[in-house]
Image (tube, rainbow, N blue to C red):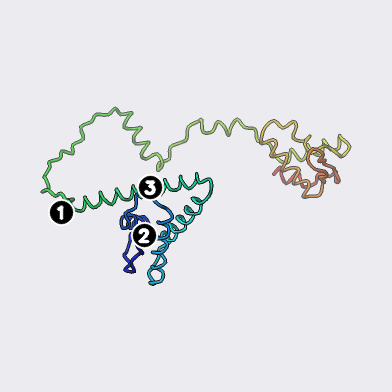
Amino acid sequence: MEKISYKLEAFEGPLDLLLHLISKHKLNIYDIPIVTLVEQYVEYVRQMQESDMYVASDFLEMAARLVYLKSVSLLPVYTEAEELKKELQGELIEYRDMKLMAQKLSETNTPGFDCFVREPIKMDIDQTYRRVHEPEELINAYISAAGKKINIPPPIEAFREIVVKKIVSVGSKISNIFSRLKTKGSKAKFKSFFSDASSRSDMVATFLALLELTKSKKIIVSGDGENAEIELIDSKIGEVSEEWNE
């Protein structure tokens, strides 16, 4: 194969360079001799570097790709090489066809080819609104457009979830915990305080009560998981319950 000339040309990308090498050395794009193509491509990139030309990363990436393709093609079982070769061949054919179409379009392009201008046409527009609406429809449209700015009372359904839910105070739970611990000999399982909770609010209040009693050193928590226990160490509620009942 003829050695690459030292007169280096500029290419738009690695596929453009590969097409140039295939065309110059009359290679078959449908059956590319990878070994020969790799040598020519790598040699060209090397000359670009020696000439202090800027070598874009995609040129180096293609060089690495071709070297890898050459390596796997030398293996006894080269199924991967065939797949990589078909992939590269498809990219080259697609790039070649796009270049041909771009050339044909550029040949047909003439000044004003993609520019169409006409004189503006004066149009008489009647802006009279002629639709007829029911009063209820107008009210709903007004509420929809201005409802966020005017004070419209929320519907009754908005309060239903708040009204029906029972509010459980932390203070009542503190008193309940003291009573249970005194009844059960100052000790009880941690999870037993949640077994009779009737709602999420009940569970949250119980948990907060236990935290407050632990913080004020009225009880201690020992053990882990299922074996965790609550032990009463100060039987006087004092100001703890009163603070949470306020």
Image height of 131 relative to 39, above or below: above
Compared across the picture, whether 39 is left or right of 16 comes to right
Which one is in front in this view, the residue at disc 3 or the one at disc 2?
2
Indicate the amino acid at tag 2: Met
Indicate the amino acid at tag 1: Thr
Q: Position of residue 131 (x, y in %)?
A: 23, 31
Which quadrant would the N terminus be assigned to in this image?
Answer: bottom left
> Which residue position holds label 3?
31
User: How many discs appear?
Assistant: 3
Q: Are marks 2 and 1 in contact (CB under 8 Å)?
A: no
Mark toward the start of the polypeptide (2 vs 1): 2
In this view, the residue in front, 246 or 126, is 126
Mark toward the start of the polypeptide (3 vs 1): 3
Q: Position of residue 216 (x, y in %)?
A: 78, 50
Q: Are marks 3 and 2 in contact (CB under 8 Å)?
A: no
Q: In what element is the residue under mark 3?
A: loop
The residue that appears at 40% across and 39% down in the rendered structure is 147
> Which residue position holds label 1?
110
> Which residue position holds label 2?
1
Task: Work out how far the residue at label 3 is from the one at label 1, CA to CA, in angstroms.
Answer: 39 Å
